Each structure stands twice: as structure tokens, then as C-alpha cells.
Amino acid sequence: MPAFTVRPFRRDDRDQLTDLVNAHVAAVVPGVSVSVNTVLGDLERQPDEALTDPWVGERVTLVAEQRRAVVAAAHLLRYRDGQEVGDTYRDAGEIDWFVHWPPASFRPDPETAADGLMAACLAQFARWDVRVRRADGALPAPGVYGLPRNWPHIRALYERSGFRHVGDTEAVLIARVADLPRPEHLAGLTFTRTVGECGTRLTAHDGTGAALGFIEVDTALARPERHVRATGLADIGNLHVAPASYGAGLEGHLLAEAAEWLRLCGVDRLLAYESAGDERAIGLLLAGGFRELTRTDRRWEHQTPGR
């Protein structure tokens, strides 16, 4: 059995680690890869997590090396226990992401190395003496979070290590913008474009000017310094329709307006995320030109000894 070593990440691991990360990204979202700078930046800070990132007190990145190759890696976070930290995060330890190569002829036993790395992660949690141990799969790429169903080797590792899925399941969907509906000009229905919470907001108004619903699309997923191959990709940050407008087809009109704006932006693919239990929302997206990429299971927890 090939020997392996678990050790802290070194800067000269950066290219192998990026290859490992991109292999997992590519299994979830087509045509997306991240740069070395993106991976290195994620190890130091997560600026997109404006609420939770300031609560992180410690960050540790570990790798498992076998035959001088990085075959597994994990990034750990320890949240502080101060009153400024949200209740669910306070004094929590989290595997922000864990990736490892599946077995192959030239990698005889990467699972043993992955198990060894997981043991080191749990040992780090024990040294931190955290209140709760959690795990996720939030790689620094759009649409990759939770534990995607496309990673059965990571799921098997989590489960045999004592982690259990305790959160929600979400559907991740994608559409080619060219396949989305074209806007229809309807009497009494107008649209405005403003800055939204999660991107550009397009709001539908009736003849009196009252807002009926809105959609927000984020076209800043592929900042040049971060993503090598994510140009032309956007996602739906919010889609809201007033209850009084249910059944009137307003979601389709909002999606068509968003698609027209995305075409002007040069965006050719659009991501969307919905709760797996919301069959109505998923059905509307599928009918509008989306297809499902994966299901992802959020929030995994490990039983902490003595807690």
C-alpha cells in the first residue's frame, strides 16, 4: 500500500491543488474552472461571504501527499465564540471543502489517504475544542456548494467518517440564455431596472405603477482576476412574485426580461437554485428552458465526543 503523508498546505502545492479543485468543479458546472489565484485567495479570505467571513477566527488547509502527488485536500474554518457571531456559527468548526481523487490505475489507494486526511481534520477540531463540527463542499466557483450528488466519493467519505446530512437539499439548474423566452410587450405591464441585493434587479409594474414582482441576476460571477473559464455565466439571485400575481405567468415575463438583459451583457448561460421540495418553482424553470444539473445536500454535522 503506497505510503501517504498528511501535512499543512505549502505554496508549491498550488498547481496540484487547483487541478484537484477544478476536477470537482467540472463535474458540477459545465465549462467552469478557477485560477490558481482564486484558490489561493479562498484559503486566506472569502470576500463573497460578507456576513460570515468576518466571524472566522482561524483557517487551516491540509493536504494528503502520496508519491509526491497531492491526492486530497481540505480547508477548515473555526468560527469565534464572541457575541458578534451568529448563534449557529458561534464556536463551530467547519470543513469548508474536502476534495480527493477517486481510485484510478495510477492512484492505487487515494481513499486511504483521504481517510487519513479526514482523521487529521477531526483531530484539528478536537484541538480547537469546537462546540459543533460541520462539513460542506463550498469550492470557490459558482454553483458549487453543499455536497453535490456528482461527488459520490466525497459523500462516502463523509458518511464513513461519521458526518450526517441534517440540512436542506437544493436543485441547481442551468439554461442557455438563447433558449429562454423572448419578452412580450403586454398592455399595462412595464419593467424597471435598478440595483438589487444580489445583482441587477428587474421589477414588473402594473398600470398603476405598483410592483408585482422582481428578478435579480448577477453577472459578476467571472471577475477576470478570479475565474479562468466562467465568462458568459450569470445566476438568478432572487425571483419574487407577489402572492396576488400567482398563476398569472409573471415569472415567465420576468425571466424573459432578464434573458433580454443578459443577451445585451454577452451572457450565454444562466444558473438558478431552488429548494428540492419546491416542485412549483423547479417546474417553472424547467418549462422556461432550464435543465437540472444536480441536487446538493447542505449542512452536514459530526457527533462531537462529550458534547
Image (cartoon, rainbow, N blue to C red):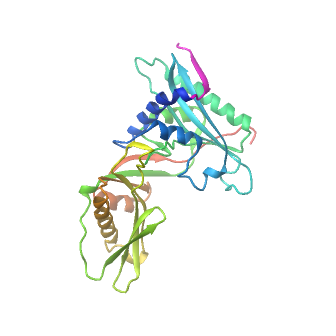
Q: Is residue 127 left or right of residue 52?
A: right
Image location of residue 24, percent across then percent down: 43, 36
Residue ID at (44%, 56%): 277
Q: Is residue 293 left or right of residue 60?
A: left
Quarter holding the C terminus is top right
The total of numbered circles placed on residues is: 0
Image location of residue 246, percent across then percent down: 37, 73
- Figure check: 61 above or below 103: below
43 and 178: which is toward the camera: 43
Q: Residue furthest front?
A: 225
Residue ID at (55%, 43%): 136
Q: Residue furthest bottom?
A: 208
**Magenta segment boundaries in residue numbering:** 1-10
Image location of residue 38, percent across then percent down: 48, 41
Give the image quarter of residue 83: bottom right
Residue ID at (42%, 49%): 223
283 and 39: which is toward the camera: 39
Q: Residue furthest top?
A: 1
Q: Magenta stretch containing residue 6, yes or no? A: yes
- Figure check: 253 above or below 188: above
Residue ID at (31%, 67%): 257
Give the image quarter of residue 290: bottom left
167 and 210: which is toward the camera: 210
Q: Magenta stretch containing residue 148, yes or no? A: no
- Figure check: 106 above or below 100: above
The answer, for residue 205, to whether it is visible in the render is: yes
Image location of residue 174, percent across then percent down: 34, 51
The answer, for residue 159, to whether it is visible in the render is: no
